[in-house]
Image (tube, grey):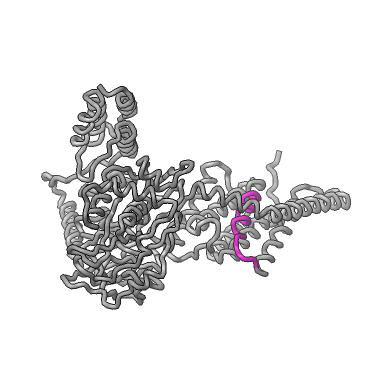
Amino acid sequence: MSPPRPPALGARLLELLPLVAAFNVNAVAHHRFALALPLEAALGFMAFRGLGAVHSSRRMLLAGGGLALIALVLQLLGALPPPPPGPVPPLILGPLCAGLMGLAAFCALSKNLMYSSIYAWMLAVLSVHVKPDAPLAAMLIILAVAALASAFAESALWKQGAVGALLFCAFAAAVAGGTVVLTRVLLASEGMLMQAFASLGRDLELRPGVGLEDSVLLRARSTVVASPRPMLELSGPLPARLRTTVHDRFDGRRWTASAELDRDFLSDRGPPGAEVENQLVMLEELAPFLPVPAGTLSISGAAVEPRPAGLYRSARLRGQVLRLRRSAREEEPESAPPSAALIEVPAELAGDLARHALALTPGATTPRQIGERLEAYFRDGFLYSLSTDLAARGRHPLLVLIEDKRPAYCVWFASAMALLLRAHGVPARVASGFAIGEVNPLTGVAVVRERDAHAWVEAWLPTGAARGRWTAFDPTPWRSRDAELGIDRNPGLLAQLFSALVAGGRRIIAAPGVLLEVARSPVALALLVLFLSARLWRTRGSKGAKSARLVERPVDPRLRTAYRDYLRVLAKGARLAPLAAETDDELLARLRAARGETAAEAARRFLSRYRAARFGSGPTGTPLAPELAALRRALQAPVP
């Protein structure tokens, strides 16, 4: 038997026509011809040469995932424009559409035309979430005609002459009519659907953080996404925080900026005292927000606009290298006393917050003492969590947080402390921006990541060393925050070297003008000398003793999870949370005093297994579930 003849060129092109039409829909809607046209040219060449592909799940995923990864890299580097904003974030939508292109193309080449058509239609659906115009409408019409023509050819109805043509026309009319009816039904019920989605969004919201928001909405149930994407790098004497926004009005659910902030617009930003300089390398576009430390006096390297409350704005930030001159004490100059609006508390919270404010600050007589007592209450007695569940019938979420000590993230602690300060008559507001977390000790450069988005409290103090100035208080429980975010405060030497090299590469990509700064850096010179010495040592073939290296074992994610569960078990079963500078052994001693020797022995066994798995020579994946279960049982038993 002779092998089957390959289909004619016309048939192959007809099979690819809906695919090419869907690619053009995406190119027109998202302005991404740089991705669609090369892929269409490759498909046409393979069809002309009669080339195909052997289908397998692995190859199909490689085709889709590989093209998605290429599109993501090109989009991050600026070589490929991101999709327009819509229901799906551009950073996700761009690679997703590219992946669908790869899947559709591979399925078409491997003769899986049904799957190819499905992926093409999915691509078209994701592409049309933009304002319609004539070119896009034309591309959609071409896509529909191409799909019908391809389906007609595949159905073999054309072989039945006029009868087949009529049957296919009836099928097309039924599909078109059903589409029109379904569209009208969806449009008629759009309001009901949007209301349902809004109701769902009120119960659970995914947010990237609080550092870059003009207003902050408190939701009883919400989740913050902790992304490790680097946003900027900071060198020089490092501040504690970078400010982007200030919110001073709270209506019971949302923090916003009021006209009161205009009174805080100071022409002279320079308080007396020593000054320092910082260099800021912007790795991502944050415009119009410009993260700067408190007390910033001047900025060079970009056009900036001073704003009230010591804030700054800028039109374009990505790739900019800025030099900041600021107060070494990281504080704003004196300002006039705030109005009574800065001590207002919503009526639904006023009574309960006043009662809690007095109970939590016994013996405090000055605003600073009150602030320090409240700061310690939240920092030492709560746990940090990226997900919050503060819903309770008849109680405000902030009261649930204070009274039940449930886990939450920074903006909740800042909001609660600011309102408790106001209940004491101390003017307070919530500031947002970024915390300084990851610092490389080899270079002194801090990498600020998206997960470092943070919120804290600023209180106006009328007396003391900070008289007449807004002073920062940070009630976030930092120890459990680092554990929740997976931040390692003590990376090994190899990790520090790798981080320094990666940071240098990011600076080169983000800002080519910083090459001269890198060349002048003594760290760059030291790394060059180290590299040349290693090459010379290798060339000589020396087999002498090598210098000792500090190599830390990587922390297994399961160990991080187990330790976080350990802290949660103690918080729930014994009402104990680690203090700011407390060791595990000191926390164990407090547990022994509170719950007796049985509970302390169960916790000691967990810590012993945990330390052996993390710091010993055994495998890092040691299961710790039995020890956690034993600790839970011990804490559930009556106190002897």
Quadrant in the picture for the N terminus: top right
Front residue of this view, candidates 262 and 625: 262
* Main secondary structure of the magenta stretch: helix
Front residue of this view, candidates 14 and 104: 104
Q: Give percent across and percent down for residue 569.
A: 33, 33
Q: Give percent across and percent down for residue 452.
A: 33, 55
Q: Is residue 117 magenta?
A: yes
Residue at point 33%, 57% (across, down):
422
Residue at point 22%, 25% (across, down):
596
Q: Is residue 301 visible?
A: yes
Residue 117 vertical position relative to residue 431 in the rendered view, above or below: above
Residue 240 vertical position relative to residue 408 in the rendered view, above or below: below
Residue at point 24%, 64% (across, down):
462
Q: Give percent across and percent down for residue 489.
A: 24, 48
Front residue of this view, candidates 235 and 168: 235
Q: Is residue 224 magenta?
A: no
Q: Give percent across and percent down for residue 565.
A: 34, 35
| Residue lying farthest to the right in this orientation | 162
